[in-house]
Image: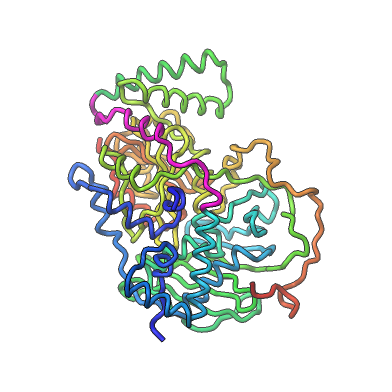
Amino acid sequence: MSRVAVALIGAASLVAVSACAAPTVGSRPWAAATVLAAPVDLPDDPAALTLLTRAARSALTASYDAVIVSTSPDSPAPVRLAIAHRPGIGTSSAPEDGSRPAQLTPDDAVGTALPVSLRLLDVLVAHFGLALAGQGEVLSRPADVVEATDARGVVEARFWLDRTSGLMVKRELIDPTTGATRATEFVSLTVPAKSEIRAATTQVPAAGPALDGVAVARLRSEGWICPEGLPGGLSFVSADEADSGAVHLVYSDGLDVVSLFVQKGHLDTKAMPGLQSVSGQAGQAGQAGQAGQVLHTDTPVPTWVWQSSGSVVTLMTEAPRTTVERIISAVPPDSA
Amino acid sequence: MTACLGRRVAELADGRLVGSELERALAHVSVCASCRDALEIQRSMKARLRGSNGPGPSDTFIARLSKVPDSPVRTDPSVAFAKSRARHRRRIAVAGASTMVVALALVGGASTLAQTATSVPVVVPNLAAFSAEHVSVSGSLPEGGSARAHDADPTGTRFQSAGASVSYDQTDLRSPEGLQPP
């Protein structure tokens, strides 16, 4: 199998990468996160797996136009997005009000806004117990409801799978710490007669060349921040070359996707005036420019930047703030 | 019938099952439609990945990263910072850059150049490029109204349809003729 394929198969690649790694705890506090991230093999309901597999396949093979609404405790108002999927092309998305142009996400992204991807399904199965919980209704249509349960038996996600199309038409992510719920739901769904994407669409640039397990292990042995896992059950999924000589590390638990960009050097905080300084914990205000501080912005995606052990770490994720705080604690900012 | 394969489907597709485990898996797949289905998906996905490979991991990229000084940030950050800032300013002056985008690009360039020197490089993360990369792997949808994620393709022309006014027969899925199960 090619190196890129190895990197992209997600959970399967974890074994190879872990086998190559020689983590050293102590001077590298992030290495300790490995222990926290080891997935527990939980039993899965075959019916749930069948439904989710079908949803993943439908997400790749079906053409559809939809409007989805996302709600989150971190967002002041629901977000409405018009999306369109075309097999072999990808998914275009744009605010329903047309406030910015549509952009295209390729089909082989780790995760998607709602239709579950095969890559994410792999990780999801590895981290949660999946069970058919009952029946529901979305868009006035019958749907099967699948629950994802963690090792403690706590439900962390619910998925509604449309019986007709097979698509995942609603998803609820429940923060096990706070109980806060983020939900994404189809509020309209149509199938087009023609295959073109509706409007002018900008392609999301593809990720850089993938780094295989050997490359990641080498970087890790040379002291680069490359955790094998992150708190909150986030497992390493893939790594690739990023802009400006950065290493892009991708983690997921099957529900959230976390990007960690690592660059060796000293953070020039003065060159980033648009970011707010927080005090090492997501959401807590601090004094700008001090060592040990974390810079933060919510646009275009929630981002945190800090200095840690001679490296500059940039974290991007839509995961709950409690998860962000735990990640920052695992890769701690240098103290003043 | 034995229990479904679950994530062992991926191992089967990868050819990582051997001996009796392989035989049991194949026997199960022969009688279980859902696992057969999952195996077919895994294989087609891997075939797609093989067929769409970009360049492999760059040896020069790893070698370049290996040359970045591993000195702790406290070694002499002020000197490194001052040197790099001076380089940064010179480059900006020469280029006559006035926009934030160009300035950020130059900072990125200065940072890359600094990595070849022996001092600790000064880093300004390129958040526009990083957010685009995050979106490309996560499939997340930027909600902040900023178009920074689109900067990597300023022409905005790729994947345009033949015409922006393409019309659709909007077959409502609530009708019996709606989207059929794939």
| Magenta segment includes B61 | yes
- Residue A291 lies, in percent from the top left, at 30, 34
Q: Is residue A56 left or right of residue A295?
A: right
- Residue A223 lies, in percent from the top left, at 26, 38
Q: Residue at x 37, y 75 (%)?
A: B23
Q: Which residues are magenta?
A: B50-75
Within the image, what quadrant is residue A261 found in? top left
Q: Is residue A179 left or right of residue A34?
A: right
Q: Is residue B160 left or right of residue A248?
A: right
- Residue A42 lies, in percent from the top left, at 34, 73
Q: List the single residue furthest toward the left.
A: A26
The relative height of residue A104 versus residue B119 in the rendered view (above or below) is below
**In the rendered image, which quarter contains the C terminus of chain B?**
bottom right
Within the image, what quadrant is residue A196 found in? bottom right
**Colour approach in the figure:** rainbow
The relative height of residue A189 versus residue A307 in the rendered view (above or below) is below
- Residue A276 lies, in percent from the top left, at 43, 40
Q: List the single residue furthest toward the bottom.
A: B1
**Total number of numbered discs in the rendering:** 0
**In the rendered image, which quarter contains the N terminus of chain B?**
bottom left
Q: Residue at x 46, y 48 (%)?
A: A4
Q: Residue at x 29, y 61 (%)?
A: A38
Q: Nearer the viewer, residue A320 or B52?
A: B52
